[in-house]
Image (cartoon, coloured by chain):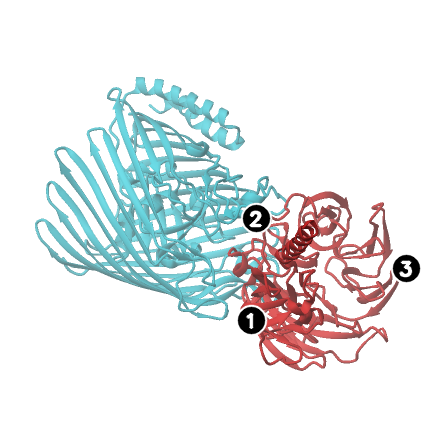
Chain colours: A red, B cyan
């Protein structure tokens, strides 16, 4: 009897344990739901780093995702059949890199799908998987008119080759209040050097939304900027530099506090800036030299030049090309493109007659840095100011014999993107300008109307 | 009589001049004002009062006589008196359907019938006040306190006023009182935003000789609150709701000294000297005001204007000989090195012959030599001579029909000026016991010689510019009604004005005087503009139970569009910037015994402000109210207290795009009159 009782007890205990085991079948956990980010029109795999369910009691093949709301601007497919949208897949499919999202190339910046998950017994309630779509966008900075209309931004979308004007107003619902001299992409933000009103302000590089007020204290006639770590270095003229070249300075902006932490005096009207090996190179526009400032000690030394400078381009070896210009206040016949070896600070000039002295983006490099496109201007036989794009071969260190394009009246800047040369044309300071794209052999591709006085292209990828 | 008091007279006149020349501080001014006034008061007590006979120096009657069909409006005395503490800008805005582009009372310019500010001449005697460098007058710098009357001619008036009167002309009037004894006034006014006015007028004479001294001091801090709609707070997601105007202060002072002599009723001599020093901080736009609170941009004007005239009308052939001198100097941002100065010497002579009561004619010539001293002009430009020959013919053909013809030919050194004839008529359709109807019409050519800046400013001026040319057609009627208790009129004028060769400063490439290609701002003949529309004006005076009331309504419809332009950025066939299509104002002034109450309001339609359609000034409505009472201390001494409330609805509006204007504000004034 006693043995029988114990056997019964053992059986009950076993059953109970067995039963308890069934009851504690763990609910799958949505461990990772990071979403994906892909370029407009692209296809992207969804991996376990972006979407993962953990369930120690089920193998990945048993964890089933059911799509309850499909993406709108693209589709989910298996890589083995990219034509057919799927509505069910497993964690194993994800782990095996079998599931991908194909964007439909629409001009949307976000998409998503919602899903439920089951391990056969338990169901996780509906969740959303976000899909961010970015375009290879290029922003055209339209300067406006110093004493009139303020800047506007046009956005060029690479895939569709469409240009949309007044992008800033569209996104922010208010117009700009400054004339933007230069824009700079850094750490997810686009920093803009605003004149009249003098300020530095910034927008999100993707959404173009401005959420903070600009910096005005300590900023007088900002020209250009470059960032290093947590600091933005801004060249400022400090007033009427053409009357007093000692007014200018470098504003050191703390990007955390969004304040000008220090004004470092630098006479000579610094314009373009570049940072190499902990040194800030400043192109002086009213003095025939290039300033080199040690970012740690703020000690300044100078590289003597044969003409005043305006802008830099940094090559892939961190050496610098700098424009040498003939200006009204500092005339020189030794104009062209100079090369600065940043290890030795050696200076070599490649002459180019008529290199533009405009305060616009006068130089741009192609993607592999084999060519530099340099803006020049000269009066033609009919006394019309005619612009041209000269091509500098960085391998041979020489200008090509023929210009890429020439005879462009009102040429106001050059850029390179999407394997095209972008030329900006400004017929006057009160009328809308033009963006004209050319192939790298100089064939005109397309013309677009921009805002007033377009002057530079800012590519954001 | 004068001889015995010549010292006193000298002391009375002298302090004002002394003050003005030395430009001392306000306290000194007040001291001088008080001193003058006390000495005058005591003198007045002993001298007593004689009858004052009024006679105009600026004779609108004469202007009208030779310009039949032209529309010339004189601001009524009641309306003028209500606005004596302010500037010409405020007077015109409140009383006539005229638009002015203003910047918070510190600067303003007129746009008469859709024309530009340099298309309206502002005349003081035979002097056109418009700057020879800029071509226009700042209406905020013309203080009404110094004047007795203002007349406005709508439509081209070049045949009478010479260059620049394409859109019309304004005449600032002084009245010859031929005072016997002494008459004086002191005025103190205080208002919102630190506004202060101190002024005095002293008339001394013996019926033949007369000295009139008028001087004033005006200042305003102009620190009014406004809603800043140009600054967006991205962190709060709102526009800055509250802001205060900074650095828009005004400080003006001026003196007019008249010395007149009446040989007989038909032979007079007048001498007018007007000294003016006006200073203001240029108002910054709303963004600059917010972001650059310390930005101060001063501008100072110094003017000397002298006009003297001898008239002899004793015989059938009347003649008048006049002369003048004008000194204008503008200093921007304390930059005395950048001199912008002109001097003018003017001489004029005319003869009028009345053949009979129905026919008369007038011929004359006006010559001036101008010395510009402007830092950007070529040193070769020492002076410029201008001579105008004119002739006017008046013919009353019958009881009903009057016709006039005016001819003018100007000659300018190295510049060709067009011949400008004008023909006008006035026809009495009917005349009954209580009412009459007139029809009038006018065809006038007009012109404007480009300003010195247009022609000689560094590289950018162009001496080869063509003169602007205007052609004005006018047709109107006026119905007058008059009974014992009520009188008034209804007036409708239609106009068509074409202005060709309109000069603008544009940015772009051009060839300078040395034959070099430049890319900069420069002056050129750009467009042809057509302005057409009509003006409806009515005013009624009526009495009821001893209460006298004057009420009026004005409405203007002005369609002004560029019709041709060599600049593709100018929108052709669209309403011109800063010209509202519709404008209307209403006023009523009620007087009972020594108390008067007035209400006036004005509606201004929306206005384009640039070539694009993205910056449009909204329409706005302003309402003002005033009340005044005069206390008679005795037969010789009166005190008048007046209070005025402007912009009662505290309307948030702009007159110049992006620039704040004050909301509700007040002004209290106290005027003490002797005799």
| Residue position marked by numbered label 2 in the rendering | B340
Q: Position of residue B99 (x, y in %)?
A: 37, 52
Q: Nearer the viewer, mark 1 or mark 2?
A: 1
Circle 1 residues within 10 Å: few <14, some 14–19, many ≥20: many
**Which is nearer the eye, A162 or A59?**
A59
Q: CA distance from mark 3 to mark 2?
A: 54 Å
- Residue A414 in view, yes or no: no
Q: Which residue is mark 1?
A: A73
Task: Give the label, 3 or 2, closer to the camera.
Answer: 3
The chain under label 1 reads: A
Mark toward the start of the polypeptide (1 vs 3): 1
The correct choice, above or below, for B545 with respect to A123 in the image is above
Q: Are marks 3 and 2 on the same chain?
A: no
Whether label 3 touches label 2, CB < 8 Å: no
Residue A174: x and y in percent read 52, 55
Give the image quarter of residue A161: bottom right
From the viewer's side, name the closer residue of A129 and B153: A129
Label 3 secondary element: loop
The outermost residue toward the front is A1
- Residues at marks 1 and 2 touching, judged by CB atoms closer than 8 Å: no
Relative depth, front residue between B538 and B597: B597
Mark 2 nearby-residue class (10 Å; few <14, some 14–19, many ≥20): some
Label drawn at residue A343: 3
Which quadrant of the structure image shows residue B476?
Answer: bottom left
Left or right of A33? Residue B41 is left
Look at the picture and state if B120 lies above or below A164. above
Q: Element under label 1?
A: loop
Name the mark on residue A119: none
């Amino acid at each position: 009897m006693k043995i029988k009782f114990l056997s019964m007890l053992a059986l009950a205990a076993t059953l109970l344990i067995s039963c308890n085991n069934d009851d504690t079948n763990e609910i799958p956990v949505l461990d990772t739901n990071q979403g994906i980010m892909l370029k407009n029109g692209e296809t992207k795999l969804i991996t376990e780093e972006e979407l993962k369910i953990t369930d120690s009691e089920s193998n990945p093949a048993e964890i089933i995702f059911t799509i309850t709301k499909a993406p709108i601007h693209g589709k989910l497919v298996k890589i083995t059949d990219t034509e057919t949208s799927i509505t069910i897949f497993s964690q194993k499919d994800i782990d095996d890199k079998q599931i991908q999202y194909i964007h439909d190339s629409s001009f949307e910046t976000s998409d998503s799908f919602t899903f439920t998950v089951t391990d056969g017994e338990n169901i996780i309630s509906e969740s959303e998987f976000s899909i961010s779509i970015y375009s290879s966008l290029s922003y055209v900075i339209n300067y406006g008119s110093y004493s009139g209309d303020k800047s506007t931004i046009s956005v060029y979308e690479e895939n569709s080759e469409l240009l949309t004007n007044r992008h800033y107003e569209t996104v922010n619902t208010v117009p700009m209040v400054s004339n933007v001299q230069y824009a700079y992409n850094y750490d997810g933000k686009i920093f803009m050097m605003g004149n009249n009103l003098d300020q530095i302000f910034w927008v999100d590089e993707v959404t173009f939304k401005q959420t903070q007020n600009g910096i005005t204290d300590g900023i007088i006639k900002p020209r250009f900027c470059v960032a290093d770590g947590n600091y933005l270095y801004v060249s400022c003229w400090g007033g009427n530099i053409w009357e007093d070249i000692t007014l200018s300075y470098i504003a050191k902006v703390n990007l955390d506090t969004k304040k000008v932490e220090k004004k470092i005096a630098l006479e000579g009207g610094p314009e373009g800036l570049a940072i190499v090996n902990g040194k800030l190179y400043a192109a002086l526009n009213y003095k025939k030299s290039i300033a080199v400032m040690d970012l740690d000690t703020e000690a300044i030394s100078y590289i003597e030049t044969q003409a005043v400078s305006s802008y830099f381009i940094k090559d892939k070896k961190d050496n610098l090309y700098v424009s040498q210009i003939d200006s009204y206040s500092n005339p020189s016949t030794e104009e062209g493109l100079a090369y600065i070896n940043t290890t030795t600070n050696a200076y070599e000039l490649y002459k180019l007659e008529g290199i533009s002295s405009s305060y616009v983006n006068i130089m741009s490099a192609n993607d592999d840095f084999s060519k530099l496109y340099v803006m020049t201007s000269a009066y033609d036989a009919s006394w019309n100011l005619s612009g041209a794009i000269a091509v500098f071969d960085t391998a041979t260190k020489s200008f090509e014999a023929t210009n890429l394009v020439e005879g462009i009246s009102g040429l106001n800047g050059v850029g390179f993107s999407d394997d095209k040369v972008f030329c900006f044309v400004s017929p006057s300071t009160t009328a809308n300008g033009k963006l004209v794209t050319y192939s790298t052999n100089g064939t005109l591709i397309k013309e677009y109307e921009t805002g007033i006085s377009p002057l530079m292209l800012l590519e954001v990828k | 009589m004068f001889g015995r008091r010549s010292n006193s007279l000298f002391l009375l006149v002298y302090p004002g001049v002394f003050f003005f020349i030395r430009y001392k501080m306000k306290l000194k001014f007040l001291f001088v004002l008080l001193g003058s006034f006390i000495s005058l008061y005591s003198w007045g007590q002993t001298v007593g009062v004689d009858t004052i006979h009024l006679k105009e120096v600026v004779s609108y009657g004469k202007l009208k006589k030779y310009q039949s069909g032209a529309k010339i409006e004189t601001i009524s005395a009641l309306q003028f008196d209500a606005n004596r503490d302010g500037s010409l800008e405020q007077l015109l805005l409140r009383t006539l359907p005229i638009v002015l582009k203003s910047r918070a009372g510190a600067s303003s310019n007129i746009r008469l019938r859709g024309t530009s500010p340099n298309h309206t001449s502002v005349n003081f005697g035979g002097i056109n006040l418009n700057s020879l460098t800029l071509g226009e007058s700042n209406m905020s710098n013309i203080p009404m306190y110094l004047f007795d009357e203002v007349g406005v001619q709508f439509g081209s008036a070049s045949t009478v006023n010479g260059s620049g009167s394409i859109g019309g002309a304004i005449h600032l009037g002084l009245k010859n009182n031929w005072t016997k004894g002494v008459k004086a006034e002191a005025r103190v006014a205080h208002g919102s935003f630190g506004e202060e006015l101190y002024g005095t007028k002293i008339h001394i004479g013996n019926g033949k000789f007369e000295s009139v001294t008028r001087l004033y001091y005006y200042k305003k801090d102009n620190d009014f609150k406004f809603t800043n709609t140009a600054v967006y707070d991205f962190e709060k997601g709102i526009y800055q709701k509250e802001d205060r105007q900074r650095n828009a202060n005004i400080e003006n002072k001026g003196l007019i000294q008249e010395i007149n002599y009446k040989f007989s009723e038909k032979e007079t001599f007048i001498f007018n000297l007007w000294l003016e020093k006006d200073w203001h901080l240029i108002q910054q736009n709303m963004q600059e005001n917010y972001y650059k609170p310390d930005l101060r941009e001063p501008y100072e004007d110094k003017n000397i204007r002298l006009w003297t005239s001898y008239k002899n009308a004793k015989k059938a052939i009347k003649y008048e000989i006049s002369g003048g001198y004008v000194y204008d100097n503008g200093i921007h941002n304390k930059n005395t090195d950048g001199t912008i100065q002109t001097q003018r010497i003017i001489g004029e002579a005319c003869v009028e012959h009345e053949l009979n009561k129905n026919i008369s004619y007038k011929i004359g010539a006006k010559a001036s030599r101008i010395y510009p001293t402007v830092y950007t002009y070529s040193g070769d430009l020492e002076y410029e001579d201008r001579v105008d020959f004119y002739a006017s013919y008046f013919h009353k053909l019958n009881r009903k029909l009057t016709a006039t013809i005016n001819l003018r030919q100007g000659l300018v050194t190295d510049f060709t000026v067009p011949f400008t004839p004008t023909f006008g008529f006035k026809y009495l359709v009917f005349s009954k016991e209580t009412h009459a109807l007139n029809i009038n019409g006018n065809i006038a050519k007009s012109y404007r010689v480009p300003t010195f800046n247009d022609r000689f400013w560094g590289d950018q001026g162009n001496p080869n510019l063509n003169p602007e040319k205007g052609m004005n057609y006018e047709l109107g009627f006026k119905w007058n009604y008059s009974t014992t208790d009520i009188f008034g009129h209804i007036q409708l004028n239609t106009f068509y004005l074409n202005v060709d060769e309109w000069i603008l400063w544009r940015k772009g490439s051009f060839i300078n005087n040395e034959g070099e290609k430049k890319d900069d701002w420069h002056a050129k003949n750009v467009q042809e503009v057509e302005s057409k529309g009509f003006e409806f004006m009515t005013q009624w005076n009526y009495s009821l139970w001893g209460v006298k009331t004057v009420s009026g309504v004005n409405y203007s419809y002005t369609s002004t569009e560029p019709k041709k332009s060599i600049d593709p950025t100018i929108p052709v066939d669209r309403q011109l910037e800063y010209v509202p299509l519709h404008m209307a104002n209403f006023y009523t002034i009620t007087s009972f015994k020594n108390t008067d109450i007035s209400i006036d309001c004005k509606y201004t339609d929306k206005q384009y402000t640039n070539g694009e359609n993205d910056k449009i000034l909204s329409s706005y409505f302003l309402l003002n109210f005033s009340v005044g009472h005069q206390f008679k201390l005795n037969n010789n001494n009166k005190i008048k207290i007046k209070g005025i409330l402007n912009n009662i609805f505290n309307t948030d509006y702009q007159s110049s795009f992006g620039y704040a204007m004050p909301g509700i504000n007040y002004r209290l004034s106290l005027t003490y009159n002797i005799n």
